[in-house]
Image (tube, helix red, strand yellow):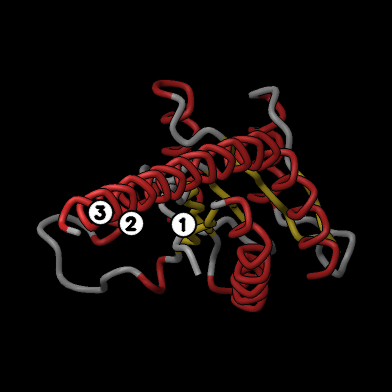
Amino acid sequence: MRKNINLHKIKIFLASSNELKFERKQIEIFIAKKNKRLMNYNIFLELVLWEDLMHSYNRTRIQDYFNEEMSKCKIIIALFYTKVGLFTKEELNIAYNGMKKNDQPQYILVFFKKPKSRKINLEIRQLQNEIENQEQLYNTFTNTDDLLNQLSSQLELILDASVQIGKKMNNLENIVVNQILDSSKVETVVGSIGYIENFNISK
Protein backbone atom coordinates (compact mmCIF):
# COMPACT_ATOMS: atom_id res chain seq x y z
CA MET A 1 0.00 0.00 0.00
CA ARG A 2 1.32 3.41 -0.95
CA LYS A 3 2.21 5.55 2.08
CA ASN A 4 0.72 9.04 2.44
CA ILE A 5 3.51 11.51 1.74
CA ASN A 6 1.61 14.74 2.42
CA LEU A 7 -0.10 14.21 5.78
CA HIS A 8 -1.82 17.39 6.98
CA LYS A 9 -1.64 17.35 10.79
CA ILE A 10 -4.00 19.50 12.86
CA LYS A 11 -3.17 19.85 16.56
CA ILE A 12 -6.01 20.17 19.08
CA PHE A 13 -5.47 21.11 22.72
CA LEU A 14 -8.07 19.96 25.26
CA ALA A 15 -8.30 22.17 28.34
CA SER A 16 -10.44 21.29 31.36
CA SER A 17 -10.31 20.51 35.04
CA ASN A 18 -10.06 16.93 36.25
CA GLU A 19 -13.77 16.86 37.19
CA LEU A 20 -14.46 16.34 33.47
CA LYS A 21 -12.09 13.38 33.21
CA PHE A 22 -14.77 11.14 31.69
CA GLU A 23 -15.62 13.69 28.98
CA ARG A 24 -11.92 14.10 28.21
CA LYS A 25 -11.57 10.36 27.66
CA GLN A 26 -14.64 10.26 25.42
CA ILE A 27 -13.27 13.10 23.30
CA GLU A 28 -10.00 11.18 22.96
CA ILE A 29 -11.91 8.13 21.68
CA PHE A 30 -14.04 10.34 19.42
CA ILE A 31 -10.96 11.93 17.82
CA ALA A 32 -9.34 8.52 17.27
CA LYS A 33 -12.45 7.30 15.40
CA LYS A 34 -12.64 10.45 13.31
CA ASN A 35 -8.99 10.04 12.31
CA LYS A 36 -9.80 6.72 10.61
CA ARG A 37 -12.04 8.55 8.14
CA LEU A 38 -9.85 11.62 7.80
CA MET A 39 -6.80 9.55 6.86
CA ASN A 40 -8.49 9.04 3.48
CA TYR A 41 -7.92 12.76 2.95
CA ASN A 42 -4.38 12.76 4.36
CA ILE A 43 -5.58 14.59 7.49
CA PHE A 44 -4.66 13.63 11.05
CA LEU A 45 -6.05 15.22 14.21
CA GLU A 46 -3.41 15.23 16.95
CA LEU A 47 -5.09 15.62 20.33
CA VAL A 48 -2.80 17.22 22.92
CA LEU A 49 -3.66 16.32 26.53
CA TRP A 50 -1.77 17.59 29.55
CA GLU A 51 -1.84 14.01 30.87
CA ASP A 52 0.29 12.91 27.91
CA LEU A 53 2.83 15.72 28.18
CA MET A 54 6.09 15.45 30.10
CA HIS A 55 5.60 15.72 33.88
CA SER A 56 9.17 16.55 34.77
CA TYR A 57 10.59 19.41 36.85
CA ASN A 58 11.01 22.48 34.66
CA ARG A 59 13.02 25.68 34.87
CA THR A 60 9.71 27.55 35.05
CA ARG A 61 6.23 26.50 36.15
CA ILE A 62 5.04 23.23 34.64
CA GLN A 63 1.94 25.15 33.50
CA ASP A 64 4.20 27.39 31.38
CA TYR A 65 5.32 24.25 29.55
CA PHE A 66 1.71 23.19 29.02
CA ASN A 67 0.88 26.69 27.75
CA GLU A 68 3.78 26.56 25.30
CA GLU A 69 2.54 23.25 23.89
CA MET A 70 -0.97 24.70 23.64
CA SER A 71 0.34 27.66 21.64
CA LYS A 72 1.38 25.22 18.88
CA CYS A 73 -2.20 24.02 18.41
CA LYS A 74 -4.65 25.18 15.76
CA ILE A 75 -7.79 24.34 17.76
CA ILE A 76 -8.46 24.78 21.49
CA ILE A 77 -11.31 22.97 23.23
CA ALA A 78 -12.12 24.25 26.73
CA LEU A 79 -14.56 22.43 29.02
CA PHE A 80 -16.11 23.76 32.24
CA TYR A 81 -18.58 22.30 34.73
CA THR A 82 -19.02 23.27 38.39
CA LYS A 83 -15.88 25.36 38.72
CA VAL A 84 -13.47 27.45 36.70
CA GLY A 85 -10.15 25.69 37.06
CA LEU A 86 -7.33 28.17 37.61
CA PHE A 87 -5.12 26.68 34.92
CA THR A 88 -7.99 26.09 32.48
CA LYS A 89 -8.95 29.77 32.74
CA GLU A 90 -5.30 30.73 32.22
CA GLU A 91 -5.13 28.53 29.13
CA LEU A 92 -8.31 30.07 27.74
CA ASN A 93 -6.99 33.62 28.28
CA ILE A 94 -3.64 32.83 26.67
CA ALA A 95 -5.34 31.15 23.73
CA TYR A 96 -7.67 34.11 23.16
CA ASN A 97 -4.79 36.60 23.36
CA GLY A 98 -2.78 34.47 20.93
CA MET A 99 -5.71 34.39 18.53
CA LYS A 100 -6.00 38.18 18.59
CA LYS A 101 -2.26 38.78 18.20
CA ASN A 102 -1.12 36.23 15.64
CA ASP A 103 -4.15 34.09 14.74
CA GLN A 104 -2.83 31.13 16.72
CA PRO A 105 -4.90 29.26 17.67
CA GLN A 106 -7.32 29.77 14.82
CA TYR A 107 -10.31 28.29 16.66
CA ILE A 108 -11.44 28.23 20.30
CA LEU A 109 -14.42 26.06 21.24
CA VAL A 110 -15.79 26.58 24.76
CA PHE A 111 -18.29 24.19 26.31
CA PHE A 112 -20.09 24.46 29.66
CA LYS A 113 -21.71 21.36 31.11
CA LYS A 114 -25.13 22.21 32.50
CA PRO A 115 -25.34 21.68 36.28
CA LYS A 116 -27.80 19.17 37.73
CA SER A 117 -29.43 21.91 39.78
CA ARG A 118 -30.68 25.20 38.37
CA LYS A 119 -28.20 27.11 40.48
CA ILE A 120 -25.09 28.09 38.51
CA ASN A 121 -21.76 28.53 40.25
CA LEU A 122 -20.88 32.22 40.59
CA GLU A 123 -17.44 31.97 38.94
CA ILE A 124 -18.97 29.97 36.06
CA ARG A 125 -21.55 32.70 35.54
CA GLN A 126 -18.82 35.35 35.68
CA LEU A 127 -16.82 33.54 33.00
CA GLN A 128 -19.89 33.24 30.78
CA ASN A 129 -20.53 36.97 31.24
CA GLU A 130 -16.91 37.68 30.36
CA ILE A 131 -17.22 35.69 27.14
CA GLU A 132 -20.45 37.48 26.27
CA ASN A 133 -18.88 40.88 26.98
CA GLN A 134 -16.11 39.96 24.55
CA GLU A 135 -18.91 39.37 22.02
CA GLN A 136 -17.89 35.73 21.66
CA LEU A 137 -19.90 32.50 21.83
CA TYR A 138 -19.89 29.47 24.10
CA ASN A 139 -21.79 26.19 23.99
CA THR A 140 -23.64 24.25 26.69
CA PHE A 141 -24.20 20.50 26.89
CA THR A 142 -26.22 18.16 29.10
CA ASN A 143 -24.33 14.89 28.64
CA THR A 144 -21.44 13.32 26.77
CA ASP A 145 -23.48 12.46 23.67
CA ASP A 146 -24.68 16.05 23.46
CA LEU A 147 -21.09 17.29 23.80
CA LEU A 148 -19.74 14.96 21.10
CA ASN A 149 -22.56 15.82 18.69
CA GLN A 150 -21.87 19.53 19.05
CA LEU A 151 -18.13 19.02 18.82
CA SER A 152 -18.55 16.89 15.70
CA SER A 153 -20.62 19.60 14.02
CA GLN A 154 -18.07 22.29 14.83
CA LEU A 155 -15.13 20.19 13.69
CA GLU A 156 -16.88 19.37 10.42
CA LEU A 157 -17.17 23.10 9.71
CA ILE A 158 -13.52 23.66 10.61
CA LEU A 159 -12.24 20.64 8.72
CA ASP A 160 -14.19 21.25 5.53
CA ALA A 161 -11.44 23.45 4.12
CA SER A 162 -8.77 21.01 5.27
CA VAL A 163 -10.58 18.12 3.59
CA GLN A 164 -10.63 20.05 0.33
CA ILE A 165 -6.89 20.62 0.70
CA GLY A 166 -6.45 16.93 1.45
CA LYS A 167 -8.34 15.96 -1.70
CA LYS A 168 -6.19 18.27 -3.81
CA MET A 169 -3.04 16.85 -2.21
CA ASN A 170 -4.28 13.33 -2.94
CA ASN A 171 -4.99 14.24 -6.57
CA LEU A 172 -1.60 15.87 -6.93
CA GLU A 173 0.10 12.86 -5.35
CA ASN A 174 -1.73 10.52 -7.73
CA ILE A 175 -0.68 12.63 -10.70
CA VAL A 176 2.96 12.55 -9.58
CA VAL A 177 2.86 8.78 -8.98
CA ASN A 178 1.25 8.16 -12.38
CA GLN A 179 3.87 10.30 -14.06
CA ILE A 180 6.59 8.30 -12.35
CA LEU A 181 4.96 5.04 -13.41
CA ASP A 182 4.56 6.31 -16.98
CA SER A 183 8.18 7.41 -17.13
CA SER A 184 9.24 4.01 -15.82
CA LYS A 185 7.25 2.35 -18.61
CA VAL A 186 8.95 4.57 -21.19
CA GLU A 187 12.37 3.72 -19.79
CA THR A 188 11.48 0.03 -19.90
CA VAL A 189 10.36 0.28 -23.53
CA VAL A 190 13.41 2.29 -24.53
CA GLY A 191 15.62 -0.19 -22.73
CA SER A 192 13.94 -3.09 -24.52
CA ILE A 193 14.35 -1.43 -27.93
CA GLY A 194 18.01 -0.82 -27.22
CA TYR A 195 18.46 -4.44 -26.22
CA ILE A 196 16.76 -5.66 -29.42
CA GLU A 197 18.90 -3.38 -31.58
CA ASN A 198 22.07 -4.55 -29.89
CA PHE A 199 20.94 -8.14 -30.29
CA ASN A 200 20.35 -7.67 -34.05
CA ILE A 201 23.72 -5.97 -34.55
CA SER A 202 25.56 -8.72 -32.72
CA LYS A 203 23.87 -11.31 -34.93
Q: Position of residue 189 (x, y in %)?
A: 38, 49
**If you read the primary sequence from the N terminus, does the residue marked by circle 3 or circle 1 appear first?**
1
- Identify residue for label 3: 200
- Identify residue for label 2: 66
**If you read the primary sequence from the N terminus, does the residue marked by circle 2 or circle 1 appear first?**
1
Q: Is residue 94 above or below residue 152?
A: above
Tag 3 near tag 1, CB within 8 Å: no
Q: Which is more toward the observer, 82 or 63? A: 63
Tag 3 near tag 2, CB within 8 Å: no
Q: Residue furthest front?
A: 203
Circle nearer the viewer, 3 or 2: 3
Amino acid beneath label 3: Asn
Q: Rounded to the nearest whole Å, what is the CA distance between mark 2 and mark 1?
A: 30 Å
**If you read the primary sequence from the N terminus, does the residue marked by circle 3 or circle 2 appear first?**
2
User: Is residue 85 left or right of 188 when viewed as pictured?
Assistant: right
* Element type at mark 3: helix
* Element type at mark 1: loop
Q: Rounded to the nearest whole Å, what is the CA distance between mark 3 and mark 2?
A: 73 Å
| Label 3 crowd (10 A; few <14 / some 14-19 / many >=20) | few
